[in-house]
Amino acid sequence: MFSFVVLLTIIGGVLLYTGTAGVLLMFAPKGKKVTAEDVRTEPVSQDLSGLPALSKYKARDGNELEYRYYPVVDFPDKPVFILLHGISTDGKYLHSLALPDNAKRDGACIRP
C-alpha cells in the first residue's frame, strides 16, 4: 500500500510539472525576438581626471599587484574601503565611486 501511494505521488508530480510547462509554453507571449542589432549600446564615458597613479605591492606569492589609493586628507582616522573589481578589467569604472568628494564615502579608499 505504501509503495502504491509513493508511486502515485511521483506520477502525479510528473503530470503536474509537465502539464504546467505545457500550458506555459502554449500561452507564452509572442513577442519580437531581440537581436544584437536591436540593442544599441553607446560607449560610456567617464571623467578620469584626478585618477591616482598606480602603486604596486608584492603579494605573498611574489607577484606584483597594482592598486590606486584615494586618501581623505581631512579625516585621517576614518576607515579604509577596499573596492575590488573583476579580473577582466582594470577597475577604472570604480573611479567615480572612490573619489574623495563622493558624498557617500566616509573614509579612505584603496582600489586594486
Image (tube, grey):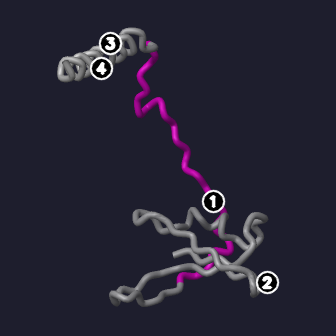
Left or right placement of residue 80 versus residue 39 in this view? right
| Amino acid beneath label 4 | Gly
45 above or below 66?
above
Q: Which SS class for mark 1?
A: loop
Q: Which SS class for mark 2?
A: loop
The disc, 1 or 4, on the residue closer to the chain's N-terminal end is 4
Label 3, label 2: how many angstroms apart (C-alpha)?
A: 63 Å
Q: Residue at x 68, y 75 (%)?
A: 50
Give the prevailing secondary structure in the magenta stretch: loop
Task: Read off the residue under disc 2.
Answer: 75
| Amino acid beneath label 1 | Gln
Label 1, label 4: how many angstroms apart (C-alpha)?
A: 53 Å
Viewer-side label of 3, 1:
3
Which residue is at the front of the view, 112 or 7? 7
Viewer-side label of 2, 4:
4
Residue 66 image position (x, y, % from top left): 47, 81
Label 4, label 3: how many angstroms apart (C-alpha)?
A: 10 Å
Residue 89 image position (x, y, % from top left): 45, 64
Label 1, label 2: how many angstroms apart (C-alpha)?
A: 27 Å
The disc, 2 or 4, on the residue closer to the chain's N-terminal end is 4
The disc, 4 or 3, on the residue closer to the chain's N-terminal end is 4
Q: Residue at x 56, y 74 (%)?
A: 111
Q: Residue at x 81, y 84 (%)?
A: 74
Left or right placement of residue 18 versus residue 86 in this view? left
Task: Read off the residue under disc 4.
Answer: 13
Task: Read off the residue under disc 3.
Answer: 19
Mark 4 is surrounded, within 10 Å at the Cα level, by few (under 14), some (14 to 19) or many (20 or more) other residues, namely few
Label 2, label 4: how many angstroms apart (C-alpha)?
A: 62 Å
The residue range painted magenta reads 30-54
Viewer-side label of 4, 3:
4
